[in-house]
Each structure stands twice: as structure tokens, then as C-alpha cells.
Image (cartoon, rainbow, N blue to C red):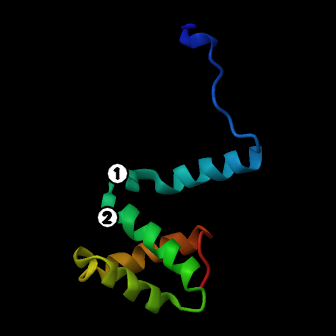
């Protein structure tokens, strides 16, 4: 088996995609270890793609109904939604 220093580092083929990935990691910042935050953010993103005709209130309602633990988290879900929108990851 060759030594590890002979193995090349993985890189993105497209530098634009790599930059987008780096920006996304910066966007996650301290929230990367918060499993509720990550699940809510990914659910908002997914529901926005699945139901593009729906507005923010409908999507937030779907997130709240998706998981029992989100049922009483409307304010936090709205904050996460606003952060995602501000970063340009979703548009209403």
C-alpha cells in the first residue's frame, strides 16, 4: 500500500461548484452541529422544490407537520426560512 502522501487530494472539477460548496459551508457555520436546524433547513428546501406553487406559510406548515418535535417551533422555522432566503438558497 502506498504512503498517504502519494495520494492526491480530492478536488472539484468545476471551480464554480467548489466555491458554491465553500459558501454553503460558511452559511452553515455554527448550525452544522444542530440536528434540528439542519433538518428544518433541508425540509424547507425540499418542500420548496416539491411544491413550488406554495408560499412560505404553507411550506412552514408542512415542516411543522412533518415531525412532531417541530409542531411548536413556528418562530424558529420562520427564522431559518428567512436565513435561507436571505442567502438566496430559496425564493418565495
How busy is the neighbourhood of tag 2: few (under 14 within 10 Å), some, or many (20 plus)?
Answer: some
Which part of the image, by quadrant, shows the C terminus? bottom right
Q: CA distance from mark 1 to mark 2?
A: 9 Å
Of residues 5 and 74, the one drawn nearer to the viewer in this rendering: 5
Q: SS of the residue at dot 1?
A: helix
The residue located at (38%, 80%) in the rendering is 63
Above-or-below relation of 75 to 54: above
Q: Is residue 55 left or right of residue 20?
A: left
Q: Is residue 86 left or right of residue 37?
A: right
Which residue is labeled 2 in the image?
A: 36
Counting from the top left corner in percent of width and height, residue 30 is at: 39, 52
How busy is the neighbourhood of tag 1: few (under 14 within 10 Å), some, or many (20 plus)?
Answer: few
Above-or-below relation of 19 to 63: above
Q: Residue furthest front?
A: 1
Which residue is labeled 1 in the image?
A: 33
Q: SS of the residue at dot 2?
A: helix
The residue located at (54%, 8%) in the rendering is 1
The residue located at (49%, 87%) in the rendering is 56
Counting from the top left corner in percent of width and height, residue 22 is at: 60, 47
Above-or-below relation of 69 to 11: below
Of residues 86 and 92, the one drawn nearer to the viewer in this rendering: 92
Task: Kindly indicate the quadrant of the structure image that contains residue 52.
Answer: bottom right
Of residues 79 and 24, the one drawn nearer to the viewer in this rendering: 24
The residue located at (54%, 91%) in the rendering is 54
Counting from the top left corner in percent of width and height, residue 25 is at: 53, 50
Amino acid at each position: 500500500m502506498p504512503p498517504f502522501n502519494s495520494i492526491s487530494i480530492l478536488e472539484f472539477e468545476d471551480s464554480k461548484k467548489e466555491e458554491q460548496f465553500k459558501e454553503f459551508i460558511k452559511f452553515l457555520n455554527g448550525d452544522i452541529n444542530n440536528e434540528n436546524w439542519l433538518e428544518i433547513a433541508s425540509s424547507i428546501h425540499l418542500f420548496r422544490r416539491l411544491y413550488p406553487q406554495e408560499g412560505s406559510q404553507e411550506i412552514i406548515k408542512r415542516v411543522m407537520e412533518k415531525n412532531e418535535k417541530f409542531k411548536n417551533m413556528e418562530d424558529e422555522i420562520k427564522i431559518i426560512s428567512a436565513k435561507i432566503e436571505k442567502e438566496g438558497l430559496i425564493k418565495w
